[in-house]
Image: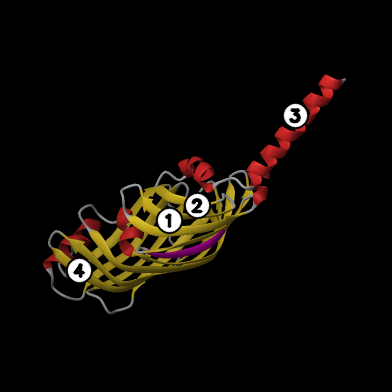
Amino acid sequence: MRGFRWFAAIVVLLVAAAGVFYWFLPAGIAVPLLARKAPGLVLGDLSGTLWDGRAGRVATADGRELGAATWRLGRDAILGRIHLDLHLDGRAGRFDGHLDRTGPDAVTWSAVDFRLDAAAVAAAMMPAGTVPAGVVEGRVPRAELQGNWPVALDADVAWRKASVRTPEGDVTLGGIALKANVASGVMRATVGDDGSGSLAVDAVLAASPLGWRMEGKLVPRVSDSALTRLIARFGPVARDGSVNLQRKAGLAPRIEP
């Protein structure tokens, strides 16, 4: 009986110690393990706890510095309930948002508000050999994702003072706005310029997990060889210098009028 009491006391102490360790889990121990799920980011100079912590250095995998991040995470994460408030601020700009895990493969972002350098946001989407410049601002009141695909979305994104550095020279685009929403599993977006740049942009996009389609037109407002070579990457250049956007992949949804 005495041996059993000692065993029970040890178990209770171990459980209590594990509980205290979980409650005050250091960010330096937990975050590197969790960061493996976000291989595109590198977090350093960690302090605080997993629940209320700070990363003094956040960078992309290719070494681009983004700034410092702070976060608050609900301690019921052990039960699979993720409630995360995230704030990023630094040389690349700022990002604020709230994340809730709503299912095994479903998350909801809300109150997302960001202002980031275009190079940190759009570089991966640009043609090879080009570098975007300017600032990308966006607001996403709510975005529901199922398996990394948005099933509900309302987003407004603006590329301010947009320009692109190309091997032939810099191309000034002015301001470009994107508005996107999702209905019945299909994401639809419109892209247009504000009239202040060297290129008129008017395009629509429809996408689903099975494919995507883009239609529209790029029309130069000035005669410039760098601009011509840039838009030629998106399709054949017509005699008037414009490019018709007619691109699709997979089982592309139709473009609604």
Task: Identify which residue is drawn at 59% across, 52% down.
Answer: 51
Task: Identify which residue is drawn at 14% across, 65% down.
Answer: 169
In this view, the residue farthest toward the bottom is 196
The residue identified by callout 4 is 171
Looking at the rendered structure, the kind of residue marked 4 is Val
Looking at the rendered structure, the kind of residue marked 1 is Gly
Is 164 placed left or right of 213 in the picture?
A: left
Q: What residue range appears in magenta?
A: 93-98
Query: Label 3 neighbourhood size at 10 Å, few (<14), some (14-19), many (20+)?
Result: few
Task: Identify which residue is drawn at 19% across, 59% down.
Answer: 232
Looking at the rendered structure, the kind of residue marked 3 is Ile
Which mark is first along the chain, 3 or 1? 3
Q: Are marks 4 and 1 in contact (CB under 8 Å)?
A: no
Query: Label 2 neighbourhood size at 10 Å, few (<14), some (14-19), many (20+)?
Result: some
Which mark is first along the chain, 1 or 4? 1
Which mark is first along the chain, 4 or 3? 3
Q: CA distance from mark 3 to mark 4?
A: 70 Å
Which mark is first along the chain, 4 or 2? 2
Residue 56's label in the rendered image is 1
Above or below, 76 against 183 in this view is above
Mark in front: 3 vs 4? 3
Q: Are marks 2 and 4 in contact (CB under 8 Å)?
A: no
Query: Label 1 neighbourhood size at 10 Å, few (<14), some (14-19), many (20+)?
Result: some
Q: Position of residue 56 (x, y in %)?
A: 43, 56
| Label 2 element class | strand
Residue 10's label in the rendered image is 3
Residue 47's label in the rendered image is 2
